Amino acid sequence: MVTAVLDGLGVAVPDRIVTNDDFAARLDTTDEWIRERTGIAQRRMAAPSVATSDLAAEAARAACKQAGNDSPSAVVVATTTPDHPMPGVAPLVAAQLGWDAVPAFDVQAACSGFIYALASATGLIASGVTDRVLVVGADLMSRITNQDDRATAVLFGDGAGAVTLRAGEPDEFGAIGPFDLGSDGEHVGHLVVEAGGTRAPGPAPDAPERYLSMNGRDVYRHAVRRMTDSSTQLLERAGLTIGDIDRFVAHQANLRILMAVADHLGIPDERRVSNVDRYGNTSAASIPLALADAALRPGERILLTAFGSGFTWGSTLLTWPDLSTAPDATTHV
Ligand code: ACO
């Protein structure tokens, strides 16, 4: 059986750091409140001249460099903050890389987007459509967050992460799968950007409807339940138990959510990965950013799980490949 095998990882983050104290200086909030409720200490924010495709292309270059292979491949970009409503970001990334006539498309599954993009890429490889795919998770959440709204502004950050995938065998280091994916559109109102699509087109530039609005408590509740259930179902499908999992990388929404899911699943502290303190919630970029920071060892079996607007959720397994001789994966924009 052919599956996708990860052979490169790269991330790109903006240089500018926004601390909790930066918010506290102009909004009715404190460093203590933000840390206690979310675990976030700082996040990155892109300069106005930078678009999602710029950060995505930087991460992609770093991933190709680490793989030691920058030959053209299919491109799948997970993003909820594209450069334009049309076209998607993936063709723009392919163009920035100088890749001509490659398959390229976006996946919009909000904070679950990276898992959905991995599933799409795995399908492209398993079905023989292509034997290499570049998967990028990239979001500039600061662009859809009202920076004057203390309830949402402090939660999100900007970033991009990319992985290169090749065709391989399920028992190789780097192998990805199986997957558990799901959605429930009944809860659209709990986490939504109301305007800018076909239901409410053309908001004024500063209308509140063009920014993300969120019912924090309901998002929290659903996120914990769905990531827990999805991880459990995935393990059943794979014929594994929590004892078989070496590292747990959940979408970095909020430390309390991560800890609650890990507690429900019975994952010991030392197997939990978190860098939400430094990046906040970077949506589709959060899982590759966490992988890049996790100091993973070849052969470790990693459980990935995510939840986001939609609601959407998804989980998969990844056996960490031997990337130790490859150059540093992080670039700054
Ligand atoms: N600073 C100070 N006070 C604040 C802030 C802030 N930054 N934000 C909200 N508050 C206030 C609220 O206005 C409220 O005040 P009130 O009681 O006078 O009305 C009070 O704090 C308590 O608000 P709650 O919403 O009850 O606080 P809670 O303990 O639920 O924490 C939080 C809020 C952190 C948003 C939490 O609900 C949460 O983590 N939800 C999940 C949100 C999330 O992760 N979203 C990301 C997108 S989805 C995803 O990625 C999974």
Image (tube, grey):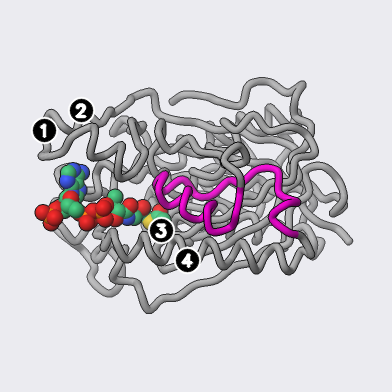
Q: Considering the numbered disc 1 on the image, is that residue within a helix, a strand or a loop?
A: loop
Please say if the residues under marks 2 and 4 sit with CB atoms less than 8 Å apart. Answer: no
Question: Label 1 is placed on what type of residue?
Answer: Arg
Q: Which of the two marks, 1 or 4, is nearer to us in this view?
A: 4
Q: Earlier in the sequence, mark 1 or mark 3?
A: 1
Residue beneath disc 4: 225
- Residue 10 place in picture, x, y as percent: 60, 32
- Residue 291 place in picture, x, y as percent: 60, 38
Q: Residue at x 80, y 61 (%)?
A: 126
Quarter of the rendering containing residue 130 = bottom right
Question: Label 4 is placed on what type of residue?
Answer: Arg
Q: Which of the two marks, 1 or 3, is nearer to us in this view?
A: 1
Residue range corresponding to the magenta coloring: 241-267
Q: Earlier in the sequence, mark 2 or mark 4?
A: 2
Residue 26, which numbered label? 1
Question: Label 2 is placed on what type of residue?
Answer: Asp
Residue beneath disc 3: 86
Quarter of the rendering containing residue 94 = top right
Please say if the residues under marks 1 and 2 sit with CB atoms less than 8 Å apart. Answer: yes
